[in-house]
């Protein structure tokens, strides 16, 4: 397992690199789960390694280790090939080994023992196959010396034994009725602390043998040093755990602080220089969304600032255009009025001067009225007086009222309005003003003989009102700014046009949540398309 940890970490790293290459975006919660999973795997691996090392330190002296060692050469033991077994390599250097029958006869000894064992002692020689723990506690009662012996077996199937011995090693109290007295040798075997142990096996001849191993004192476990070493291992593991926790917190902190730092820099730049973006940020999905939203906000602020600049420029231009359009008629009115007041004209010319003054005053009134309408439509409190209107019938009625004026000016009117009824939410008064502005321009700026074509086209979600004529048309340069305030043709300005009619028309259509465009086709040089949303 310990050797596999670097491979696990490498696989986790490769997995992370693969995900980054695929540009998979995780949420902060998912990243935290991933970090915690890696953190848990490392901690569990470290705990497993520490437990493995501590168990290995104890296993060397455990009875199960001895049993495994003897089991590995059981075939040689059963066949009597004792001399072929290297017991020092199998167990430890200077180990003493005797192979003894049930009757105590020594059939093999690696240190040349010939003395028989007492068969009754075998029960008290430590068994590797049925290990036990012996606790011998001396005590004094009524002036007499006693020893309390407790034998606790590791195997739950074995019955634990308890004896109380007097100073003559006689059993005075016990849960074992078969034992009345302990010999000195038996007590020595019980207190040998696993230095002497036995391994029972049956040979190929069917006889039961005991392998008696006597370990030298130099290889007996120094449990105090073992526990000290284990304590050091677990202390190191605790330090390692703290370091991992700090690393885990640092990773989370870095993920969050990285965006906060970039946001702080971007906010400072936005405040100091008026423009900023969060650049090259990669992190949790929520944080990337915050960075994206900040960039959208910053872009919106940039656009608002540019729009504000354009509005200021438009405002200056608007004031300049108003001044220009007011100055000309006022200058004319003032000049003619002074001439009349100073008797600088004869009676015949006075009537002409008064007519011109009246005409210029009317133009001024029209300009002021148009400017008033323009500002009213721009006011936030302005509201349309909308009602459900069948648009095709509305346009037919309007054209019927306008027909005489169009024909009187020498123009032809062509109407293409058919199909099923379409209902629009409409302010009839404002919509009439839109149609007036477009058709009056067509009448005013075109020579007799041209055709004005009005049609209504049913679209999926909108109704398109088309007003087009085959007159003189609009230049490409002027068409791009036709809806801007005070944009007029030269002949319009000379004839007293205000340049606000189409601007007002666009504002009215915008307030209806519709669109208005001006185009040019092969058949008609000027084509206005008004699109309004259907009610149902």
Image (cartoon, grey):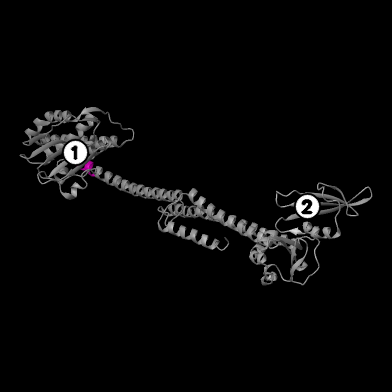
Tell me the number on the disc at residue 333. 1
Q: Determine whether, in the image, residue 408 is placed left or right of residue 239.
A: left
Residue under circle 2?
151
SS class, disc 1: helix
- Dominant secondary-structure state across the stretch colored magenta: helix
Kindly state the secondary structure of the residue where label 2 is placed. strand
Q: Is residue 462 above or below residue 162?
A: above
- Residue at 17 percent across and 43 percent down: it is 493
Whole-percent x and y of residue 82? 69, 69
Local crowd size for mark 2, using a 10 Å CA cut-off: few (<14), some (14–19), many (≥20):
some
Quarter occupied by the C terminus: top left
In the picture provided, is 384 more to the left or to the right than 456?
right
In this view of the protein, can residue 342 be seen by the observer?
Answer: no
Foreground residue, 78 or 512?
78
The question of residue 326 being in magenta is answered with yes
**Quadrant showing the N terminus:** bottom right
* Magenta stretch holds residue 403: no
- Rendering coords of residue 270 (x, y %): 43, 52
Q: Which residues are magenta?
A: 324-334
| Residue 410 percent coordinates (x, y) | 5, 36
Distance of label 2 from label 1 (alpha carbons):
132 Å
Which of 175/323 is in front?
175
């Amino acid at each position: 397992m310990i050797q596999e940890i670097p491979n696990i970490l490498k696989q986790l790293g490769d997995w992370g690199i693969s995900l980054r290459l695929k540009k998979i975006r995780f949420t902060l919660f998912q990243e935290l789960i991933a970090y915690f999973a890696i953190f848990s795997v490392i901690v569990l691996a470290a705990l497993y390694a520490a437990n493995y090392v501590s168990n290995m330190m104890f296993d060397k002296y455990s009875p199960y280790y001895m049993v495994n060692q003897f089991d590995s050469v059981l075939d040689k033991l059963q066949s009597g090939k004792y001399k072929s077994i290297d017991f020092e390599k199998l167990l430890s250097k200077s180990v003493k080994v005797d192979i003894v029958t049930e009757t105590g006869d020594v059939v093999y000894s690696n240190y040349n023992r010939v003395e028989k064992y007492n068969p009754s002692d075998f029960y008290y020689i430590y068994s590797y196959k049925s290990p036990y723990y012996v606790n011998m506690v001396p005590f004094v009662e009524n002036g007499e010396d006693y020893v309390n012996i407790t034998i606790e077996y590791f195997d739950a199937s074995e019955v634990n034994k308890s004896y109380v011995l007097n100073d003559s090693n006689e059993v005075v109290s016990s849960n074992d009725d078969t034992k009345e007295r302990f010999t000195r040798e038996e007590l020595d075997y019980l207190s040998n602390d696993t230095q002497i142990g036995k391994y029972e096996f049956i040979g190929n001849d069917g006889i039961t043998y005991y392998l008696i191993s006597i370990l030298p004192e130099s290889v007996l476990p120094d449990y105090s040093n073992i526990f000290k070493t284990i304590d050091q291992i677990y202390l190191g593991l605790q330090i390692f755990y703290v370091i991992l926790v700090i690393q885990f917190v640092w990773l989370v902190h870095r993920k969050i602080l990285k965006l906060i730092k970039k946001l702080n820099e971007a906010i400072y730049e936005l405040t100091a220089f008026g423009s900023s973006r969060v650049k090259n940020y990669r992190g949790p999905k929520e944080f990337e969304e915050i960075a994206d939203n900040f960039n959208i906000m910053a872009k919106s602020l940039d656009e608002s600032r540019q729009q504000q600049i354009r509005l200021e420029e438009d405002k200056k231009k608007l004031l300049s255009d108003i001044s220009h359009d007011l100055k000309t008629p006022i200058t004319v009115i003032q000049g003619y009025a002074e001439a009349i007041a100073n008797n600088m004209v004869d009676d015949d010319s006075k009537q002409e001067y008064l007519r011109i003054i009246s005409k210029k005053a009317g133009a001024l009134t029209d300009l002021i009225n148009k400017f008033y309408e323009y500002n009213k439509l721009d006011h936030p409190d302005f509201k349309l007086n909308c009602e459900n209107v069948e648009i095709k019938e509305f346009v037919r009625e309007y054209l019927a009222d306008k027909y005489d004026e169009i024909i009187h000016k020498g123009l032809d009117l062509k109407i293409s309005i058919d199909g099923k009824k379409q209902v629009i939410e409409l302010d009839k008064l404002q919509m009439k003003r839109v149609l007036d502005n477009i058709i009056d321009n067509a009448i005013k700026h075109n020579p007799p003989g041209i055709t004005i074509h009005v049609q209504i086209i049913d679209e999926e979600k909108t109704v398109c009102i088309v007003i087009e004529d085959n007159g003189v048309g609009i230049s490409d340069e002027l068409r791009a700014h036709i809806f801007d305030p005070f944009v007029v043709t030269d002949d319009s300005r000379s004839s007293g046009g205000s340049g606000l009619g189409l601007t007002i028309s666009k504002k009215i259509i915008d307030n209806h949540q519709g669109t208005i465009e001006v185009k040019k086709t092969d058949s008609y040089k000027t084509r206005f398309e008004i699109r309004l949303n259907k009610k149902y």
